[in-house]
């Protein structure tokens, strides 16, 4: 078997990304097609419908700006772009776009587009109301900022997984990894693609700031760090007029919104998230606590607009109070005497020989009770479906009712694949949760909005049969709690071994 080598130059990559045809979600696509054939619909009404599909909006703006450099000023908004190309041309362009049900669009592509949608909500909520005259530019530039990455992920989804593994997990330098995977800098590729596609000018400006003008950004971050002393911040800006003028540029709102969305996707409390929050607070001249409240509100609004999804949305990470993230770690209470007595009884039952269980459901029910009595306040026990190659929920405790209907595809999560290769333990802590967050299914993270989670695959003779996920309601695990979990897992493994010998 031979594989086509990846491009390794900017020109080759742009040619590759040019050829990518992004799929559009079927429902908004159908509404737009009906509107285009309805003579009673105005241009503005059709543009409003197109807004529901970022892919269709991207196609219109790209086409309108294809030769704008030599003819007209580039269209910075959808309305201008649609007026420029006309409805007939738009209809012909859309006919080339595949209309696809969301579940059939690859998860990595849907996830990166969800981040873009969240970034657009942050931009509209934080900045557009203050810069009302520029709301169109703010909206479309923030939404399409990551459009080059949409095409990259659609063409080569394996690159995203490789990048996450090397940068987020192994902590290799991002620029070094990008050069290794792409042959070029990702920021340079995004700048070149944004200019080639004629995306709104603020998009390329944002990427240039990150790649070519980092000194100004570093200076601004230095001032923003002193967020508890606004008067001193103002004095530092007054002493540096070029920095003060740069900080107030409206185009910076696009980079701020996407920085907030991308960093929150991994961790609200991570250092990268905190830096973007401080910088946005400096731009808006509001205290950090107020800025955090504003970004949380916009994240929730974004999640409500998107609706129910199997993807991860940062709003799901806000299910506990923000201030608790900065308090001293809360250590979970130990089980009381009665709970420990029940735990020992369940463990004795699991260790019984011959196996007292007539089926797997009975075994897993006892296993779930044992984990709960050991102090685990939320428990999910999933079985490996060998035929479907997926994980299926079998037992739950302390979780909402939809947890019992959960199914996960390990192929869409590198962490799950690793855990199913052989029995192993992954312990999430505040130190590593940001590294693994992007590698876990969104549905699973929604059930366990915590920085203290245990994921343990369990099996027999090297074969994995089930996955245990447990936490103590976002409390840190005590040594005794971890020991109780470990002993319970050992009893479950023994129960599986004994159960597998029945009838021999």
Image (cartoon, grey):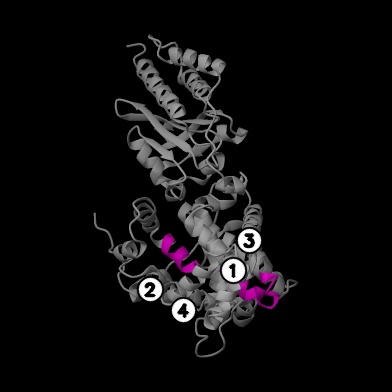
The residue pinned by badge 4 equals 195
Mark 1 vs mark 4: in front = 1
How far is disc 3 from disc 1 in space, using C-alphas?
Answer: 9 Å
Task: Work out which residue is located at the far right of the displayed protein and give it.
Answer: 40
Q: Which residue is mark 3?
A: 291
Say which of 248 and 258 sits in front: 248
Label 4: few (<14), some (14–19) or many (≥20) C-alpha neighbours in 10 Å: some
**Viewer-nearest of discs 3 and 2:** 3
Q: Sequence order check: which comes first, mark 3 or mark 1? A: 1
Which sits in the foreground, 190 or 377? 377
Q: Is residue 203 above or below residue 311?
A: below
Q: Which residues are magenta?
A: 128-153
Q: Are marks 3 and 2 in contact (CB under 8 Å)?
A: no
Name the quadrant of the C terminus: top left
Could you say whether the residue bearing mark 4 is in a helix, strand or loop? helix
Q: CA distance from mark 1 to mark 4?
A: 29 Å
């Amino acid at each position: 078997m031979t594989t086509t080598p990846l491009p390794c130059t900017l020109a080759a990559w742009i040619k590759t990304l040019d050829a990518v045809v992004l799929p559009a979600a079927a429902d908004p696509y159908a509404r737009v097609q009906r509107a285009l054939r309805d003579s009673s619909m105005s241009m503005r009404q059709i543009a409003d419908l197109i807004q529901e599909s970022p892919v269709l909006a991207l196609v219109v703006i790209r086409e309108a700006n294809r030769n704008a450099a030599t003819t007209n000023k580039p269209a910075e908004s959808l309305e201008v772009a649609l007026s420029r190309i006309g409805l007939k041309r738009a209809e012909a362009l859309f006919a080339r776009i595949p209309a696809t049900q969301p579940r059939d669009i690859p998860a990595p592509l849907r996830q990166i587009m969800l981040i873009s949608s969240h970034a657009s909500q942050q931009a509209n909520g934080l900045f557009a109301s203050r810069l009302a005259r520029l709301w169109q530019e703010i909206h479309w530039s923030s939404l399409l900022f990551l459009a080059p990455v949409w095409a990259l992920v659609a063409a080569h989804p394996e690159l995203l997984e490789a990048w996450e593994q090397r940068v987020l997990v192994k902590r290799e330098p991002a620029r070094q990894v990008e050069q290794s995977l792409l042959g070029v800098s990702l920021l340079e590729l995004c700048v070149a693609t944004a200019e080639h596609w004629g995306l709104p000018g603020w998009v390329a400006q944002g990427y240039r700031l990150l790649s070519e003008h980092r000194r100004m950004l570093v200076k601004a971050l230095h001032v923003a760090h002193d967020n508890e002393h606004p008067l001193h911040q103002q004095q530092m800006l007054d002493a540096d007029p070029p920095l003060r003028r740069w900080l107030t540029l409206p185009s910076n709102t696009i980079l701020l919104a996407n920085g907030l969305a991308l960093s929150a996707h991994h961790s609200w409390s991570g250092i990268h998230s905190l830096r973007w929050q401080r910088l946005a607070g400096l731009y808006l001249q509001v205290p950090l606590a107020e800025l955090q409240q504003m970004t949380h509100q916009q994240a929730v609004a974004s999640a409500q607009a998107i609706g129910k999804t199997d993807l991860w949305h940062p709003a799901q990470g806000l299910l506990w109070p923000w201030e608790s993230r900065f308090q001293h770690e809360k250590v979970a209470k130990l089980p009381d005497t009665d709970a420990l007595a029940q735990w020992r009884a369940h463990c004795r039952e699991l260790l019984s020989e011959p196996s007292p269980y007539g089926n797997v459901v009975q075994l897993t029910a006892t296993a779930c009770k044992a984990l709960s009595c050991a102090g685990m306040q939320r428990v999910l026990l999933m079985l490996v479906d060998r035929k479907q190659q997926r994980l299926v929920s079998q037992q739950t405790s302390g979780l909402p009712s939809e947890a019992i209907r959960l199914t996960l595809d390990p192929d869409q999560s590198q962490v799950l694949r690793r855990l199913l290769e052989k029995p192993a333990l992954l312990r999430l802590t505040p130190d590593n949760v940001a590294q693994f967050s992007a590698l876990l299914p969104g549905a699973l993270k929604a059930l366990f909005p915590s920085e203290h989670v245990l994921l343990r695959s369990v099996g027999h003779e090297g074969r994995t049969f089930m996955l245990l996920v447990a936490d103590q309601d976002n409390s840190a695990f005590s040594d005794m709690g971890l020991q109780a979990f470990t002993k319970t897992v050992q009893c479950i493994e023994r129960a599986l071994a004994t159960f597998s010998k029945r009838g021999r």
